[in-house]
Amino acid sequence: MALTNFIPTIWSETLFRELEKNYVAVKLCNRDYEGDIKAYGDTVKITGMGQVSVYDYTRNTDIEAPETLDDTTRTLVINAMKYFNFVIDDVDKAQANVKLMQEAMKNAADALADAADQYIYGLTHTDMVTVPAEAVTSATVTAMVSGLRRRMLANNVKNSTPMYLEIPPEVEEKLILAKVLTDTDNSKALSQGYLGKFMGFEIYVTNNLPRVEIGDVLTPAVGEPEDEDYVPPVLATTEIYTCYARTKRAISFAEQINDTEAYRPELRFGDAVKGLHVYGGKIIYPKEILKLSVTVDEEA
């Protein structure tokens, strides 16, 4: 593709489409405020209203004076910037097929989407509910999902409100072994992380969820040293995986693709493209998001 044929607006739109295909965390956020931002440092004021009281009505009796609803204002700040900058050598371009630039842009979108999803999973709020860690097997994974749903409803999330559950591949395996998922025959949805439905959750799998390894654990020896089948103690680490249950309005996200440009690098013979992705997110309804840490038994 020659630089003379490079139209920034079209390529920015292409990048947006590819980002949408790859998002999981971002896809499950409220995006209503996206049109209000243009650059890094922009802020969006998000105003919400308080609860409305309901009273008993008695005929021929004066009703209560109208209550003044409290409003809450939260600020979403565009505080993240990521960029890409790649070059396709003229020699490679001549020998490759004509879609080389499109493939490079898709790869850029993959990397940007991963970064944005990880940003979402890194958001915190003092009122966000953290569920105590638990061990998950194919026999207990349904109880894990049921417990998350119970906690969401206890936090006054309405039964009719769509709820989403994001899990790592290790927990996905346990759900598949439990044979409880529905709607998993849509190959397009599966390619975008959607697994199916269970317990009122739409379930998505992603490798971008946080995970940590905790200190060395000394496994006990098996048998006595003089035994032929003696197994000595070994040091091992335990990996902690994270799952999120939430509603779509729990987190608001806004993004913009700035300055997608094509150029000829001074010290290279090739076509280069660079682009800037700016975005920000905020937990707006912390009671509608649950963070669960789990360990996974690989053999159960």
Image (cartoon, rainbow, N blue to C red):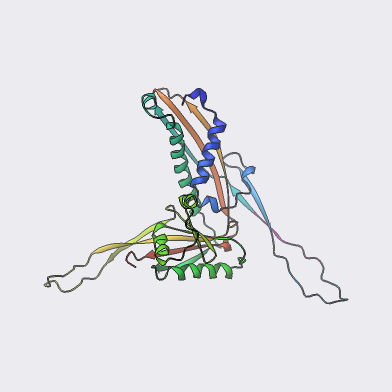
- The image shows residue 67, relative to residue 37, as above or below, that is below
Residue for point 48% across, 67% down: 145
Figure disc tally: 0
Q: Position of residue 117 (x, y in %)?
A: 49, 50
The secondary structure that most of the magenta stretch takes on is: loop
Nearest to the observer: residue 286 or residue 160: 160
Q: Position of residue 35 (x, y in %)?
A: 64, 43
Q: Quadrant location of the C terminus?
A: bottom left
| Relative to 285, 231 lies left or right | left
Q: Which residues are magenta?
A: 66-73
Let me know if residue 67 is in the magenta part.
yes
Let me know if residue 169 is in the magenta part.
no
- The image shows residue 236, relative to residue 223, as above or below, that is above
Q: Position of residue 184 (x, y in %)?
A: 47, 58
| Relative to 70, 147 lies left or right | left
Tell which residue pokes out farthest to the front in this image.
185
Residue 85 placement: quadrant: top left
Residue for point 50% across, 70% down: 146
Nearest to the observer: residue 79 or residue 271: 271
Residue 152 placement: quadrant: bottom right
Residue for point 51% across, 22% down: 4
- The image shows residue 175, relative to residue 276, as above or below, that is below
Residue 268 placement: quadrant: top left
Q: Position of residue 20 (x, y in %)?
A: 53, 45
